[in-house]
Amino acid sequence: MVSRDEADPPDNWERQIKKGWLELAILASLRTEELYGLEILRRLEEATDLVVAEGTVYPILSRLKAEGLVETKWVEGDAGHPRKYYWLTSAGRSRATAMARYASGFLGSISQIIAPLLAKEKK
Amino acid sequence: MTQAELLQRRIDAYLAELRRCLGELPPEEVHDILQEIRGHILERTEASGELTEERLVSILKALGRPEEIAPLYQVDSVVAKARTSLSPRIVMRGIQRWSVVSGWGLVLFVLGIVGYATGGSLMLSALAKIISPDRIGAWVGGGHFSIGTVSDPGSRDVLGWWLVPLGLAVGALIVFATTRLLGWTLRFARIRRPTRAPVAA
């Protein structure tokens, strides 16, 4: 571990990295269906450990709505309280695909750069 | 008071705190946010079987503190922080972030640079006066007024040593006023990235 970790709260850099990926993961989770916030959250938690504080997902969803990438509706279901459902708009779909493309290219190049760090650790 | 009432009170307190932290947002947006977060808490508690205080505390903890979540709704937290900061660096960073998405931000960014440059150079002139009293002054001559070094040999230093306290005070005042003005205008910044045409596939 580098010495910088001791100065920062241990989870700080981790948070920064996760923050960037969270938006893509949220868009990806809405790829095929309408989901409400907690459902999105559950899927993310099952598949990844991207969610640091659950409450951060809702502001991201609200921003995605403001950007026109998702659309929402309140549904009075059997839950006893209304649920806010989200789905991708066509702009959201294109953005998600573009982000996924970028991310996968980015992952390829960054993994080359970080490979020596991991190799060193194995020794 | 029963246990259930106590826990309900705890949820209400959390939501009330969130509402307080969301202050600046339009009421209908606040209503939506509270309804959604309330739904989250209720559903999490229902899923947890018998609700105990311990369970509720961990649900709220996983959600995050209201004062941490609320700024994320308002704007990018950089801008949220810049609104109340007295540090020119943090304020300018917020303005710069705003300028990426808004023409107003760009205007204010330039205004900020002008404000800080004016205030800063006044203060510098005041300090330079101490070091080099003969060359630095507030010069009047040939229909010009300038602060700094003499440009026209015929000009007269109108302030003399008064430049030191006045330059420092007025310079500091301009820097402070610029910071407050920029911070205040950031209240109107609702960072919303423009919905651009998606990147061509």
Image (tube, coloured by chain):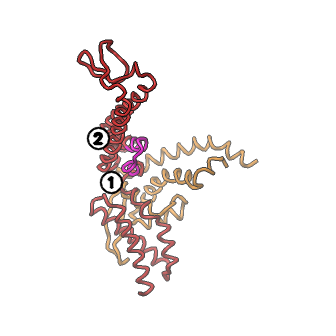
Q: Quadrant of residue B39?
A: bottom left
Outermost bottom residue: B2
> On the rendered structure, is A53 left or right of A8?
left
Labelled disc at residue A66? 1
B184 or B12, which lies in front? Answer: B184
Given the image, on which type of amino acid does mark 2 rest?
Trp
Residue B16 in view, yes or no:
yes
Outermost left residue: B143
Vertically, is B189 above or below B171? below
Q: Main secondary structure of the magenta part?
A: helix
Q: Which chain is red?
A: B
Q: Residue at x 39, y 73 (%)?
A: B13
Given the image, on which type of amino acid does mark 1 rest?
Ala
Q: Quadrant of residue A71?
A: bottom left
* Extent of the magenta region: B79-94
B175 or B59, which lies in front? Answer: B175
Q: Residues within 10 Å of mark 1 (few under 14, many from 20)?
A: some
Label 1 to label 2, Cα distance in Å?
Answer: 19 Å
Q: Which chain is orange?
A: A
B176 or B162, which lies in front? Answer: B162
Q: Secondary structure at mark 2?
A: helix
Tags 1 and 2 on a common chain: no
Instruction: Residue B193: give x, y in percent of width and height.
Output: 35, 47
Vertically, is B59 above or below B71? below
Q: Quadrant of residue B68?
A: bottom left
Total numbered labels: 2
Question: On the image, numbered disc 2 is attached to which residue?
Answer: B104
Instruction: Residue B170: give x, y in percent of width and height.
Output: 33, 36
* Dot in front, 1 or 2: 2
> On the rendered structure, is B167 left or right of B3?
left
